[in-house]
Amino acid sequence: NKLKLGLATLSVAAIALAYTPSVSAAGNNATLRVVHASPDAPAVDVYVDDKKTLSSLTYKRVTSYMSIPAGRHSIKVYPTSAKGAGTPVMTQDVELNAGWDYTVAATGKLSSIALRVYSDNLNLPGANKANVRVYHLSPNAPAVNLAVKEGNVLARNISFPNATDYLQVDSKSYNLEVQTATDSKVVLSTT
């Protein structure tokens, strides 16, 4: 089972591997996608400026990028069962710049859940290239490496809740594996 590096997103065991999608912020807007990466949290509804924007977002789900006006926004996250009433599980104000792209991830276990905001880069790479970025969003996992099976290590020592810089690779199919950073033991493979 090979993974084609192109214009898509993969989320496995709350370690998200992102590729350059074809959507990009324009004008006075930013783009934003949401990742539910809290392994023991229930399905959630996400409100932006007190308006329900996403419903029933479940663990490991990564939304598509959506266009949002630039500026300061309030993000509130409620369990879906609460139907937007009561106290949100998380509340955070975020500043979105015009023309920028963002990933907002609910990370950590429910007892210490937090919203993390990552600035993304959706600019298209050169011909026959793909931009790859790894988000380590698994709270119980040690620091990891991302490697091509029986090949080069693409990114080293990625720890929770960090994301790598963008790596430019040839656009083709790869067998990938996640290794522990300390001893290169394979803990997850795409094969």
Image (cartoon, rainbow, N blue to C red):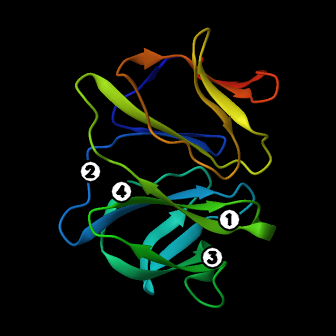
| Residue ID at (36%, 49%) | 121
Q: CA distance from mark 4 to mark 1?
A: 22 Å
Q: Nearer the viewer, residue 99 or 31?
A: 99
Q: Are marks 1 and 2 in contact (CB under 8 Å)?
A: no
| Residue ID at (58%, 11%) | 151
Nearer the N terminus, badge 3 or badge 1? Answer: 1
Q: Dot 2: what SS?
A: loop
**Residue identifier under label 2:** 23
Q: CA distance from mark 4 to mark 2?
A: 7 Å
The residue sitting at the top extreme is 150
Nearer the N terminus, badge 4 or badge 2? Answer: 2
Q: Nearer the viewer, mark 2 or mark 3?
A: 2
**Residue identifier under label 1:** 42
Q: Dot 1: what SS?
A: loop
Q: Are marks 3 and 1 in contact (CB under 8 Å)?
A: yes
**Residue identifier under label 4:** 65
Q: Nearer the viewer, residue 142 or 155?
A: 155
